[in-house]
Image (tube, rainbow, N blue to C red):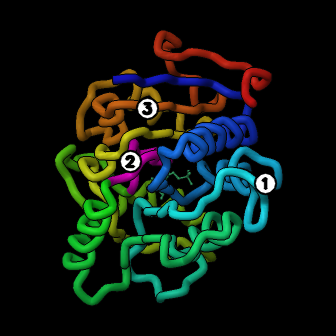
Amino acid sequence: MRLEVEVLAGAEEIGRRAAQLVADELAAGRLRTLGVATGSSPAPVYTSLAAPGGPGGGGPGEDGPGWDGVEVFALDEYVGLPPGHPQSYAAVIDREVRAPLGLDPRRVHVPDGAAADLDAACAEYERALEERGGVDVQLLGIGATGHIGFNEPGSPFSSRTRVVALAERTVADNARFFATAEEVPRRAVTQGIATIARARRHVLIARGAGKADAVRAALEGEVSPACPASALRTFQDVLVLLDPAAASRLSGRTVSRRSAADVR
Ligand code: F6R
């Protein structure tokens, strides 16, 4: 197993580093399925992947390793938002990933948080992932609670795609995307920890001092459901990309430092 931690100057450098990893996998013919997260952390990766001349070869019509045949699976979706709501993760992935990369909408999968039978929708999502043969590269953010996907503290490492309640802290943190805190859904459908663990490679991104405690717990605390992101230390191939603020509470022993100049 391999877990590497790199501290980079900021969002742009982190975006380029992660995009390069994705593009290298694509160029090597090893990227059939990309696992995507929503939120602020991975946004610079998508920008970098889609930039003309960028590592992903740009958007539609650009030269570069093609996205043909690549499928995208999202980690999670809110429960209770009307279909088409601009903050639904289906809408966010469509805006930030599908459209810039010119992907066929039929190749983009997001759990159905509006299904009448949510349990059946969760089982169907697991089945679709299974049928696809799993995720090759999974992009992840981390919540201040230590969540990955929406697996809040206490989530078993054996968990699969299911309906979960969001922690109060998560609701408060995500209120920035909504007009009022009351609008933030309290429930979500999320891939479980065991579902996420199946990916061949993981890239976790964290920026800002608000993530420093969660990053420390994930990388240096006990490996336990009390910090769901600590499950990363049981995965097979993990790259953690941090800015200096997110890395500020690490002891330093786990961290290899790279300067922006090292990043293509
Ligand atoms: C989103 C997701 C969450 C976020 C996390 C960090 O699909 O799965 O785990 O990655 O809440 O969110 P940001 O990046 O907005 O700080």
Does the image show residue 161?
Answer: yes
Reading the image, the residue beneath label 2 is 147
Placement of 31 over or under 8, stated as above or below? below
Reading the image, the residue beneath label 1 is 51
Q: Quadrant of residue 180?
A: bottom right
- Disc 1 packing (10 Å; few <14; some 14–19; many ≥20): some
Give the camera-side residue of 198 and 244: 198
- The disc, 1 or 3, on the residue closer to the chain's N-terminal end is 1
Secondary structure at badge 3 equals: strand
The residues bearing labels 1 and 2 have C-alpha atoms spaced at a distance of: 30 Å
Give the camera-side residue of 45 and 105: 105
Reading the image, the residue beneath label 3 is 238
The residues bearing labels 3 and 2 have C-alpha atoms spaced at a distance of: 16 Å
The amino acid type of the residue labelled 2 equals His
The amino acid type of the residue labelled 1 equals Ala
- The disc, 1 or 2, on the residue closer to the chain's N-terminal end is 1
Secondary structure at badge 2 equals: loop
Identify which residue is drawn at 73% across, 28% down: 263
Where residue 151 appears, as percent x and y from the top left, is 32, 53
* Magenta extent: 134-149
Identify which residue is drawn at 37% across, 72% down: 111
